[in-house]
Image (cartoon, rainbow, N blue to C red):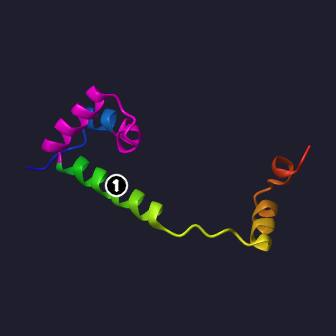
Amino acid sequence: MKHHHTDLCAQLESQLPDYLDGEARAEICRAIEAHLADCENCRIVVDTLKKTIALYRSAPCDEVPRDVHARLVRVLNLDDLLSPR
């Protein structure tokens, strides 16, 4: 049986950031976990997000070279935002 994205899926998706960060209220966690038990599509979304977060957290954090930073600031027109006042 194919599952279609429901209003419940959409409501729970809006709570996923807090759920994945461990900051969601207990009743929200229970609702998400109950939904995940019955909704393969949402379970895939949550599993993929968890893997993405884990990869991001394990990636090395190198500093952006000064010349690249300067070019990005210029291209994105961020000079005014980043200049000291």
Question: Does 32 sit above or below residue 72?
Answer: above
| x and y, in percent, of residue 16 in the image | 36, 41
Left or right: 68 in relation to 25: right
SS label for mark 1: helix
What range is drawn magenta here? 13-39
Left or right: 53 in relation to 46: right
Residue that badge 1 annotates: 50
Q: Is residue 43 rendered magenta in the image? A: no
Q: Is residue 28 rendered magenta in the image? A: yes
Q: Residue at x 82, y 62 (%)?
A: 74
Compare residues 82 and 8 and report the one nearer the observer: 82
Compare residues 39 and 69 and report the one nearer the observer: 69
Number of marks: 1
Question: Does 38 sit above or below residue 55?
Answer: above
**What amino acid is at disc 1?**
Lys
| x and y, in percent, of residue 3 in the image | 16, 46
| x and y, in percent, of residue 19 in the image | 35, 39
**In what quadrant of the picture does the C terminus appear?**
top right
Q: Residue at x 81, y 66 (%)?
A: 70
